[in-house]
Image: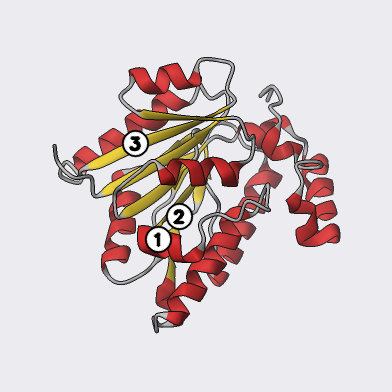
Amino acid sequence: MTTPAVAFVIPAHNEVDQLGATLAALETACTALGEVAHEVVVVDDASTDGTGELARSLGATVVHVECRQIAAARNAGARATTAPILVFVDADTLVNAQTLGEAIAVLREGALGGGAMVKLDGRIPFTAKVMLELLVVMFRLFQYTGGCFLFCRRDAFVDAGGFDEMFFAGEEIELAKALKRVGKQRGIARRRRFRIVRHRVVTSGRKVRAYTTWETLRMFAGLLRRGRAALKSRAGLEFWYERRPDTR
């Protein structure tokens, strides 16, 4: 068997309606890049809709956990892989060959990790589009990424301590900070430690369709007011941990 070069880790809670397209997109991207040797691990976190069974039927390795915490689920998936490159992908995210190819290239150039910005699928309220683009500008400026697509070298991930399981949200920002610290210790130039690639991935816009603009602004204002402590409990993080019907 070919030794995998890239490991895709996909945390999933009740994602049976999204996961198939996510896995198909990864296979298409790897094929387009010349049959990249890879492994796929889906972390089935307390699903009740057959997510794990679907993932297994589509050829993924399935790790079952009951933690309902994204950081812990991602760490569990990473432990079940062997490839030197880790790519964390959300279960509702479509990765294309251009983005994946860029990610592999920047790691080969010496970066320890990085990520990609997103496009939202479907009908998106205008205010949500504006908020997203402002967030993109800020993340590119400070070289941070969301959790939809985050990649890193395994050795750097281990040295960084993986995802900090004290956090129920924002754990991808904490990992980016930790990877940058590892890069500093290794003498890597500041702007080369953690890189945001040019191409974007496509992720589900269901959350911004399920919440009104006012609800979203009020939630993020509350998080800003409470600071990082607000991210250390699932309470108040319904935007990430509860599913509302996509009605718009």
Of 198 and 171, nearer the camera is: 171
Q: Which corner quadrant of the image does residue 2 belong to?
A: top left
Q: Amino acid at mark 1?
A: Val
**Count of marks overlaid on the render:** 3
Where residue 99 appears, as percent x and y from the top left, is 35, 51
Q: Which corner quadrant of the image does residue 234 belong to?
A: top right
Q: Please give left or right for residue 189 compared with residue 177 in the image.
A: left
> Who's the residue at 46% across and 21% down the image?
52
Q: Which residue is mark 1?
A: 197
Q: Which residue is mark 2?
A: 116
Kindly indicate whether the residue at mark 1 contacts the one at mark 2 (C-beta within 8 angstroms): yes
Q: Which residue is mark 3?
A: 40
> Who's the residue at 75% across and 60% down the image?
228
Please tell me whether residue 93 is drawn above or below residue 223 in the rendered image.
above
- For label 3, the crowd category at 10 Å Cα-Cα, with few meaning under 14, some 14 to 19 and many 20 or more, is many
Where residue 60 appears, as percent x and y from the top left, is 34, 28
**Could you say whether the residue bearing mark 1 is in a helix, strand or loop?**
loop
Q: Specify whether residue 95 is in view.
A: no
Q: Amino acid at mark 2?
A: Ala
> Who's the residue at 42% across and 45% down the image?
79
Where residue 239 appears, as percent x and y from the top left, is 72, 38
Q: Amino acid at mark 3?
A: Val
